[in-house]
Amino acid sequence: MFLRELTVSIDAIKGIGPVSIHALAKKGIYSVGSLLCYYPRTWEDRSQYIPLKDFSSSPVCTVVQVIARDWFPNSRTGKQDLKVYVADTSTRGVLVCFNRPFMKNQLMVGKYYWLWGSFQYKFGELQASVFEVEAVPEETGYEAMLDPAARLLDKALSQHFGRILPVYSLNEGLTQNMLRRFIEQALSHYADPLADELPGYLIQQHQLLPKSQAIRAIHFPRSLAELHQAQKTIKYEELFYLGVLIGKRAQDRRSTQRARCGHSVPTSRSGTVSPLQQRLLERLPFTLTQGQGEVMSAINQDMNGPYPMARLLQGDVGSGKTLVSFLAALRGVELGGQAALMAPTELLARQHGENAAGLLEPIGIRVAFLTGNLKAKGRAPLLKRLSAGEIDLVVGTHALFSKEVQYKNLRLVVIDEQHRFGVLQRQAIMSKGAHPDLLMMSATPIPRTLALTIFGDLDISIIRDLPPGRKPIKTHLARESNEAKVYDFVRDELAAGRQAYFVYPLIETDERKSLKDAKSMATRLAQQVFPRHPVGLIHSKLGEEEKRQTMEDFRSGAIRILVATSVVEVGVDVPNANCMVIAHAERFGLSALHQLRGRVGRGETQSYCFLVYSDSQTLGDTSAQPATVLTDEGKARLKVMLENTDGFVIAEEDLKLRGPGHITGTEQSGYLPLGMADPIRDAPLLEQARLDAFAMLEQDPDLLQREHLPVAQVLSRTTPFPV
């Protein structure tokens, strides 16, 4: 029997009644199988003797004698709390029993106890308020004090000492002792028949434990070595089946044969450029970077293939991903189809649409722009032309997959800033065609471990080089008290004919937060700081037409200073703007800071980014506002930005600081939570398990039909990656 087939109800375990069933249900535990899969969050090694004198190195695990007791007033509760004075062969300590008056009946003067606890010096004495005790049997008390180490290792004498104990996450109605007792009973009745879920040769090759032994050892290991082996076994198994799922999706995609519409158009003799692509390249005032050329070649190869392309294109801000997507669209048109480019905001979509029209319409490509704000008068004829195949490339927002939108032959879907779209949204646009090619783009570099986990079934391309002539952006940290110096620097750049961004975390004043906001700062900058230079304001609450006009004025130079929120994080390309000032920079994530910094540095002049941070605990009116504190994490983010310009390095640091969910947008997207494995911490194991899974699928395409692997159960779980 496989572990997840163990569906016996938990009330079969002695001691589990209605109250416990309710408490366990809150943890998602409904069966014996799910109980055994409720892994510890850590373990306490109570097999080693740690005397009181060694309290600073680790929790104490010793045998003590109670030498005195006392009561002391608790000023917070107004009640009396108990203090118990204890001693082992090394020194003395105090057990502080907050809100536990019942301990007076459990800790008796003169008696001996096994003790586990974390001690520290407070108020001139060695104290512990978090501890566990267990009475030493009367007949062994004196001997235990003479040789505590020997007695501690004698498991026959104690239930909770002399062994390694699991520590579980709890909620109301559960205690550690309850869970330990329930799981020990489940192991004794159900662990032995458990079948291995991994092929035998992999268990042997990687020196893993059999399933029944691994599941016992993960809860109650006999040694630290066995615990580590059990952890490796369970982590590898989880990551192996993650690899199977990823491989199965890649396998399914490659088995999808699509019908070809129109005739095949050859690429050039080099195999990298098609005729229509060549026409565009000849019109450009620059040549592609090596990275762009390599990606274009790979995309052409994919789109000429027998099954749909599924490729993730990563590239730092300004690396030229959008141009590559236009070249891919040309290939889709040559192959007799249509292309759709979807962006998360109308601001970004409009910029893509304008660029596409300027580059592609002169070579005969019919480009259209579609958003939800397009009025019915213009919308109806556009949709009619789209369904008739009279539009080659449509650029827009979520409107591209609206119910009334029909394509004649959608051959290529390009999704920009892919992490801003959900799984169902990607499915919706893909369903508009018959197995179209998919190109997802991200200017937020995804660390390798996450890419293998979240996008492991996709082909991944990276553009690492930037167009020639671009100068690295100089980044400076500035205390808020030195903000005037930043203003002086920007004033000089404005006088030289440049433009600047000022970004703030709030749109308008919030009395609950002592932070500067875009609205009031736009007024201050225009009237007091830069009265000689036109100032514009843009944020998410403005209407689309007002945002469009503001951006057009900024691009044309009619607006010299653009005050904004993070709405300008993507989709703003103004080469003449060379100053980015981010107020309260400690409040932004690394990804947002990197994207905002990438709005400058798009021209040939030197560009600058100023990260202005709070240099005091409280900003503005100190009478009633909550403190704005520069946290250690905030300091770490600013340090990373100061020291790095490579988006991939910054992404790795962001991963360490915030975790994978924030970066990939997977926190609320129905992704499979791994029970024990961590794709980041266990990256080497992830890569090995993925290689093994892919190799097995390669050797045996019918693996998923075989009975000795619990694949049906694995595939029935929530999908762990996006479509």
Image (cartoon, rainbow, N blue to C red):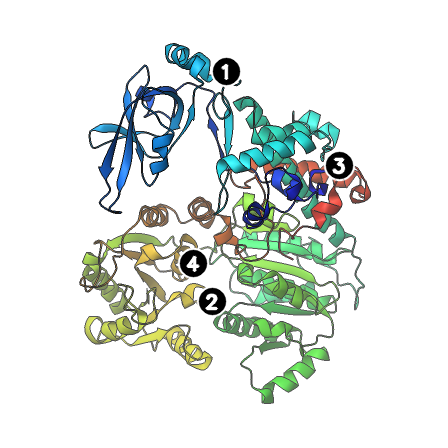
Instruction: Please name whichever residue, 66 or 321, is drawn nearer the observer in this view of the structure.
Output: 66
Of the image marks 3 and 2, the number of the one nearer the N terminus: 3
The disc, 1 or 3, on the residue closer to the chain's N-terminal end is 3
**What element does badge 4 sit on?**
helix
Residue placed at 59% from the left, 42% from the top? 16
Q: How many neighbours does mark 1 have within 10 angstroms: few (below 14), some (14-19), or many (20 or more)?
A: some
The residue that label 1 is drawn on is 154
Which-is-in-front pick, marks 4 and 1? 1
The residue tagged 4 is: 595
| Label 3 CA crowd tier, 10 Å (few <14, some 14–19, many 20+) | some
Q: Earlier in the sequence, mark 4 or mark 1?
A: 1
Marks 2 and 1, Cα distance to the nearest angstrom?
68 Å
Q: Amino acid at mark 3?
A: Met
Give how far across and how far down residue 75 sits, in percent: 22, 45
Spatial CA span between label 1 and label 3: 35 Å
Q: Could you say where residue 376 lies in the image, as x and y percent from the top left?
A: 59, 87
Left or right, 681 with respect to 611, comes to right
* Of callouts 2 and 1, the N-terminal one: 1
Give coordinates of residue 523: x percent, y percent: 25, 75
Q: SS at mark 3? A: loop
The residue labelled by disc 2 is 571
